[in-house]
Amino acid sequence: MTKLASFRERYRSNALPELRRKFGYTNPHQFPRVVKVVINVGVGGAARDAKELENATNTLAKITGQKPVLTKAKSSIASFKIRAGMPIGAMVSLRGKKMEHFLDKLMHIVLPRVRDFQGLSPDSFGKSGSVTLGLKEHLVFPEIASEDFAKIHGLAVTIVTTAESASEGLTLLQALGFPFRTS
């Protein structure tokens, strides 16, 4: 059984040469890199049931190994029965080794478990070179047992890079091994 290369090894051996070849970088500080990963769960039913918010925070804590921060509503929305300042979700920001471990787990374990997964969309990059992907079920993570949670919820994973354009970000993540659709 072969050992998978770590995130840092893939960055040094795959991403740096590819970025140098494609964009002609000479200074090491020009190379884009992954800065952080933000995992966000929005819980619309938190206004009616506080247990949903508690389930979302427990899920994030299990998945990331870090305590989530509650996100609060910025404005009141009467039709959803939400008031400004009311907790409506949770988020976690990962950096360093925890981020690298999470990205390895996302690429090699979680994404292959997603039903009908065809690859990430290259169009999901922002102008800044960061990408956000949505997962419909939190059950694709190996830390989550389906019998532990009564309600299934989705989550958004944002990979923030120092890339200055979408093409730089796409090249970086492709060289790191992320599976992208070929159109």
Image: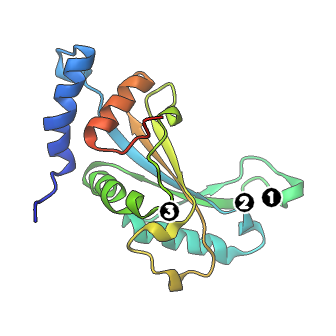
Q: Which of marks 1 and 3 is nearer the N terminus?
A: 1
Of residues 36 and 176, the one nearer the viewer is 176
Of residues 182 and 131, the one nearer the viewer is 182
| SS type, badge 2 | loop
Say left or right for 23 vs 6: right
The residue indicated by pointer 3 is 115
**Residue 159 percent coordinates (x, y):** 42, 43
**Residue 42 percent coordinates (x, y):** 63, 58
Query: Which amino acid does the dot numbered 3 rest on?
Result: Arg
Q: Is residue 128 above or below residue 44?
A: above
Point 36% across, 56% down: residue: 106
Circle 3 residues within 10 Å: few <14, some 14–19, many ≥20: few
Circle 2 residues within 10 Å: few <14, some 14–19, many ≥20: some
Q: Is residue 53 above or below residue 121?
A: below
Quarter occupied by the N terminus: bottom left
The residue indicated by pointer 1 is 82
Foreground: disc 2 or disc 1: 1
Distance from disc 3 to disc 2, alpha carbons, whole Å, reads: 34 Å
| SS type, badge 3 | loop
Mark 2 and mark 1 residues within 8 Å of each other at the beta carbon: yes
Point 85% across, 61% down: residue: 81
Residue 76 seen in the current view: yes
Point 40% across, 47% down: residue: 37
Say left or right for 19 vs 79: left
Mark 3 and mark 2 residues within 8 Å of each other at the beta carbon: no
Q: Is residue 57 above or below residue 177?
A: below
| SS type, badge 1 | loop
Query: Which amino acid does the dot numbered 2 rest on?
Result: Met
Which quadrant would residue 46 be assigned to in this image? bottom right
Residue 66 seen in the current view: no
Query: Which amino acid does the dot numbered 1 rest on?
Result: Ile
The residue indicated by pointer 2 is 86
